[in-house]
Image (cartoon, grey):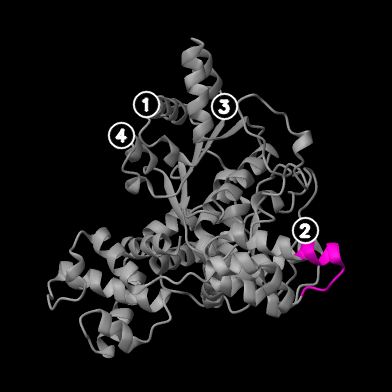
Amino acid sequence: MENELDMPSQPPQEMMARDSEGQDPVAEAWARIRGRLREDVGEVEYRSWLRQMTLSAIEGEEVVILLPTRFLRDWVRTHYSDRLRVLWQAEHPGVRRIDIRVATEARPAEPRGEEPAQPRAGGLAESLSPRQPEPVRPEPARAAEPRAAERPTNDWSAKLDPRFTFDSFVVGKPNEFAHACARRVAEKPASPGFNPLFLYGGVGLGKTHLMHAVAWAIQNGEGGVERHVTYMSAETFMYRFINALRNQSTMQFKESLRSVDVLMIDDLQFLIGKDNTQEEFFHTFNALVDAGKQIVVSADKSPSDLSGLEDRLRTRLGCGMVADIHATTYELRISILQAKAQTAEVEVPSRVLEFLAHKITSNVRELEGALNRLIAHANLFGRPVTLESAQEVLHDILRAHDRRVTIEEIQRKVAEHYNIRLTDMSSARRARNVARPRQVAMYLAKQLTSRSLPEIGRRFGNRDHTTVMHAVSRVAELMQADVSFAEDVELLRRMLET
């Protein structure tokens, strides 16, 4: 309910007393809980994730809360269920559990003409008895596994890879937000704030996997409505547009794309420098968004960094939800390898998985390829997977990843990025526009090279190792506090690692 004034907590006895006076103690308790939750998380976060919560029932020691989609249910369960339990226990100590469900998972209302079951006497439901939930429609059945052969195809959409589903996507800290946004779009396309959805990140980090997963989920009717999805690369979009111009069939081109419910364009950076194609995409974009259709786009950089695109297109791309997929962490790489080995039903020793996760760090696609190669070798020759066989079979891949980034490369790349002179890296200048890039270069030197702190200090104008330590800790702090600065440093790291 929307009346969420912050009222002081009342003990159960007072709540029951008010109930005898004809007021609804449950509604008042729920309003106080929502009000405190809004104060805890802030207005923006509350409206994004918690505003659509409704109280369904109180069953014994369990409070049942409903949300309209599986995405919201999963998010609130993960991030807010403990806080909700604490707030409910402050209102009534009898609460032990919070059950968060999708509205369609709620128990159906009692048939007409029958008396609803009464809560047991003396329990929580007796002192806090909420109104019964409204009857709900049964949730549409989901297809268990997408199969390309069963999907209707058209000349405009590329074939979807049946391996790329949400179930096979391994979620970790670097891709958690992008995955959550993709799930939201899959469950409720064209919802406010998520149209367009713009996914960006380096090569082989999972952008295409997420786009295919969204397409499969929508085609399988995850949102409860059958929709027409068209997925293609930006290159394909350009070639089809050129063919339409050549064959004088531009109206057919426009009508075919603007009749879809969901348009997905992969690798949008391909349109940089192609002005006519950009203009056509811009008009298609506007027509679909104005008609309430969903657009999902991926690229290797954020909209603001795609400098070769027209300003009006970059602005429109950035007006929805922009989600970054960061470089993988060691823990995420281990999880990906474990999932891949489990799918292949092959015993891979943990030492081998750890070795691969340490050695192949920049590209998930290459990481999976290395494991596939190792498994295939073991199957072909009937040998177990060992650390020694991994080093032998993958010697070319491992040798390529043994290339060491040098401090000189780091200094040059950082100087170019921040538009300062290379000599400023070792100069005594302390101006902010010089000192901050120098600290970033020291941080990257510590992260990407095996050089000691004193040696790094010597390469930066014979500075003391404590200066390097300060630079590393300062940059780490700024990355935690400033998202744009963190993206800047992450972009530099990617450019140096590739």
Question: What residue do we see at 64% from left, 69% from top?
Answer: 395
Q: How far apart are marks 3 and 4 (CA)?
A: 23 Å
Question: What residue do we see at 78% from left, 73% from top?
Answer: 385
N-term-proximal mark, 2 vs 3: 2
- Give the camera-side residue of 137 and 367: 367
Q: Name the residue under label 3.
A: 260
Indicate which disc residue 312 carries: 4
Q: Which residue lies furthest to the top in this view?
A: 248
Q: Report the magenta residues as a range.
A: 375-385
N-term-proximal mark, 4 vs 1: 1
Residue 352 left/right relative to 406: right
Indicate which disc residue 117 carries: 2
Instruction: Give the structural element (helix, strand or loop) at label 1.
Output: helix
Q: Residue 76: tell me if it is visible.
A: yes
N-term-proximal mark, 4 vs 2: 2
Q: Distance between the residues labelled 4 and 2?
A: 60 Å
Q: What residue type is labelled 4?
A: Arg
Q: Which amino acid does label 3 sit on?
A: Val
Q: Mark 1 points at which residue?
A: 279
Q: What residue type is labelled 2?
A: Ala
Q: Distance between the residues labelled 4 and 1?
A: 10 Å
Q: Residues within 10 Å of mark 4 (few under 14, many from 20)?
A: few
N-term-proximal mark, 3 vs 1: 3
